[in-house]
């Protein structure tokens, strides 16, 4: 076995986005494209010689080939050991779990999360640091800067490693240990939740659940935990086999793309509880019988009921949400007398708060929820949390949420995605909004009065780093908000996201259709931003 030093030239488009580098598969298949980025990661790190690296992905097309390249490059660059998931599979929260449990130096996750897969789909790669969380901006910036000038990479000339057999093998001077992808993660879940109480619920005969893994990474995890450890009937997990193209579907757990689950849960005789997860297992959608729980409400319900769950029985230190996420959890934090942090979008912004014990629960409106048990959002963790609450309370999902609204008020909330917008048009729209900000405060807009208007900037309370231009907020005196952002997770065109929120304390007004309740604000947002006029979209691609 010999180490090859291969000459290369830089690519100009390797700047990591909100959660790593995501491109179409064909881009990653270009000669040296993946190798350049992996070497840029290694070149940006200090002190990894002889250390342990964790590698795994969501099983999408090109996952296995990419892992073989990464293993050989890790060996050539001096890592001592790589822990890799069996079959190349690791959910994103499982990678975080493994990094933390085995005190690894860091990890490489291969996923484009909720983006489509297959030869014509998307692929992604991101680096996680030693706390198990996504690399902060100072690290991703260093990786990007290196990628712009890289001129060579190192790779071991060796046979491929058998990823399907659990056990250890040598690759040059490095050890590759193939781990069961599920075991360590499932063991962690057992320390947090009352599995016996949940098992009693799932085997009572009075409660039925449906878990849709969308032919993505959580299939093996969901089967092992729900149908195995918790005794749910076979077939509880649907679409449970990970496929390279996710069965031709879109592994995004929302009301549009999780259509199989929606048909079941909004049918004539729906189960008591339904859930879905995404491509890499870090997102979740919670559904009751004919009742959808918004991710923002889900976070608030978990925070309000945390002490019912063994892992959080002593309470939570604080909560954190991304800026576009509704302010429902803020009201819970206020009542509990704990801090609530508002961060930019991107799970990496929660890491410092979790490490410093300033926050225990975190969430994003984009179907991501998590806690200090790992440093990633965690889809199956959220499902287990809900099941534990349901087992304790003995109520339906709908009853729990409506009781919550009665206590805290309802934050009517919706996100409108406009996908595939021309990038120049999207930038023009955002620039037009920014040009209005300085004059909006105190002005009437429709029947609302503007309380503040800004381009959200965040100063990390722990390391004092500053992140600017994180989304345009227009807030009104009655607590309503409209927020505009360009997504950092797409690979084609731009995705414009509009977030609309209206707070309603009156319980007699808690059963209005969400889009109807938000209609005046939606109309106002279109007028202010000129969405239809500039983009040509008559309606959003996806409404959640």
Image (cartoon, rainbow, N blue to C red):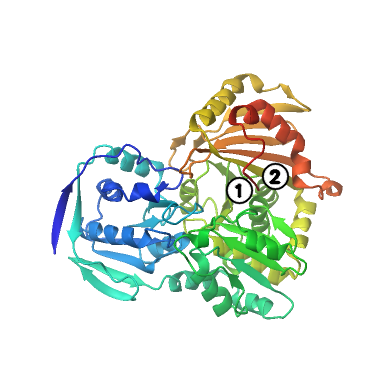
Dot 1 alpha-carbon crowd within 10 angstroms: few under 14, some 14 to 19, many 20 or more: many
Q: From what the image shows, is residue 6 above or below residue 390?
A: above
Q: Name the residue under label 1.
A: 365
Residue extending farthest right:
508
Answer left or right for 275 relative to 241: right
Q: Can residue 306 be seen in this view?
A: no
Nearer-the-camera pick, 462 or 511: 511
Q: Can you tell which quarter of the image residue 484 is in?
A: top right
In which quadrant of the rendered view does residue 325 lie? Answer: top right
Q: In this view, does 542 lie to the left or right of 462?
A: right
Q: Name the residue under label 2.
A: 413
Identify the residue shown where x is 66% and y is 38%.
539
Q: Depth check: give the residue in front, 294 or 492.
A: 492
- Closer-to-camera residue (169/118): 118
- Locate the N terminus and report the quarter of the image it occupies: bottom left
Q: x%, y% of residue 352?
A: 46, 48
Q: Quadrant of residue 52?
A: bottom left
Contact between labelled residues 2 and 1, with CB atoms less than 8 Å apart = yes
User: Which mark is first along the chain, 2 or 1?
Assistant: 1
How many numbered markers are drawn? 2
User: From this viewpoint, which residue is outermost toward the left?
Assistant: 2
Q: How crowded is mark 2: few (under 14 residues within 10 Å), some or many (20 or more)?
A: many
Q: What element carries label 1?
A: loop
Could you tell me residue 144's position as x and y percent? 33, 40
Q: Where is residue 321 in the image (x, y as percent from the top left)?
A: 58, 47
Q: Residue at x 28, y 48 (%)?
A: 45
Helix, strand or loop at mark 2: strand
Marks 1 and 2, how far apart at CA: 10 Å
């Amino acid at each position: 076995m010999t180490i090859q030093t291969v000459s290369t030239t830089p690519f100009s488009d390797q700047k990591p986005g909100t959660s790593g580098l995501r491109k179409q598969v064909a881009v990653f298949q270009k000669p040296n494209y993946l190798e350049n980025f992996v070497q840029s990661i290694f070149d940006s790190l200090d002190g990894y010689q002889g250390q342990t690296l964790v590698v795994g992905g969501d099983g999408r097309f090109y996952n296995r080939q990419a892992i073989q390249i990464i293993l050989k490059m890790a060996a050539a660059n001096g890592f001592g050991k790589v822990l890799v998931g069996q079959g190349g599979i690791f959910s994103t929260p499982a990678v975080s779990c493994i990094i933390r449990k085995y005190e690894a130096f860091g990890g490489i996750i291969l996923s484009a999360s909720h983006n489509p897969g297959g030869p014509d789909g998307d692929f992604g790669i991101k680096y996680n640091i030693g706390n198990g969380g996504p690399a902060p901006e100072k690290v991703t910036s260093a990786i990007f800067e290196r990628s712009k000038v890289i001129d060579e990479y190192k790779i071991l000339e060796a046979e491929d490693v058998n990823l399907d057999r659990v056990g250890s093998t040598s690759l040059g001077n490095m050890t590759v240990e193939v781990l069961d992808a599920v075991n360590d993660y499932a063991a962690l879940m057992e320390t947090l939740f009352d599995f016996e109480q949940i098992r009693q619920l799932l085997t009572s005969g009075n409660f039925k659940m449906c878990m849709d893994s969308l032919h993505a990474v959580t299939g093996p995890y969901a089967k092992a935990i729900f149908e195995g450890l918790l005794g749910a009937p076979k077939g509880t997990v649907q679409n449970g086999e990970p496929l390279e193209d996710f069965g031709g579907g879109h592994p995004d757990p929302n009301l549009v793309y999780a259509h199989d689950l929606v048909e079941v849960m909004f049918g004539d005789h729906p189960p008591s509880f339904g859930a879905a997860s995404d491509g890499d297992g870090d997102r979740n959608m919670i559904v009751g019988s004919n009742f959808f729980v918004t991710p923002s409400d889900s976070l608030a319900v978990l925070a309000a009921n945390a002490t019912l769950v063994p892992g959080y029985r002593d309470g939570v230190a604080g909560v954190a949400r991304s800026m576009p996420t509704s302010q429902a959890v803020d009201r819970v934090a206020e009542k509990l007398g704990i801090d609530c942090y508002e961060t930019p979008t991107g799970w990496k912004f929660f890491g410092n708060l979790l490490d410093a014990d300033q926050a225990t629960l975190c969430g994003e409106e984009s179907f991501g929820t998590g806690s200090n048990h790992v440093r990633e959002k965690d889809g199956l963790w959220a499902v287990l949390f809900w099941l534990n609450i349901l087992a304790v309370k003995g109520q339906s999902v709908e009853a729990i949420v409506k009781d919550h609204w009665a206590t805290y008020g309802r934050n009517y909330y919706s996100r409108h995605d406009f996908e595939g917008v021309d990038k120049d048009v999207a930038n023009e729209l955002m620039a037009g909004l920014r040009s209005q900000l300085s004059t909006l405060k105190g002005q009437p807009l429709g029947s609302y009065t503007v309380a503040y208007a800004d381009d959200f900037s965040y100063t990390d309370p722990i390391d004092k780093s500053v992140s600017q231009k994180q989304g345009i907020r227009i807030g009104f005196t009655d607590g309503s908000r409209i927020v505009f952002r360009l997504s950092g997770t797409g690979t084609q065109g731009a995705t414009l996201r509009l977030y609309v929120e209206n707070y309603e304390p009156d319980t007699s007004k808690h059963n209005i259709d969400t889009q109807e309740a938000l209609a005046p604000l939606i109309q106002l947002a279109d007028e202010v931003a000129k969405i239809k006029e500039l983009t040509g979209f008559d309606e959003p691609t996806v409404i959640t």
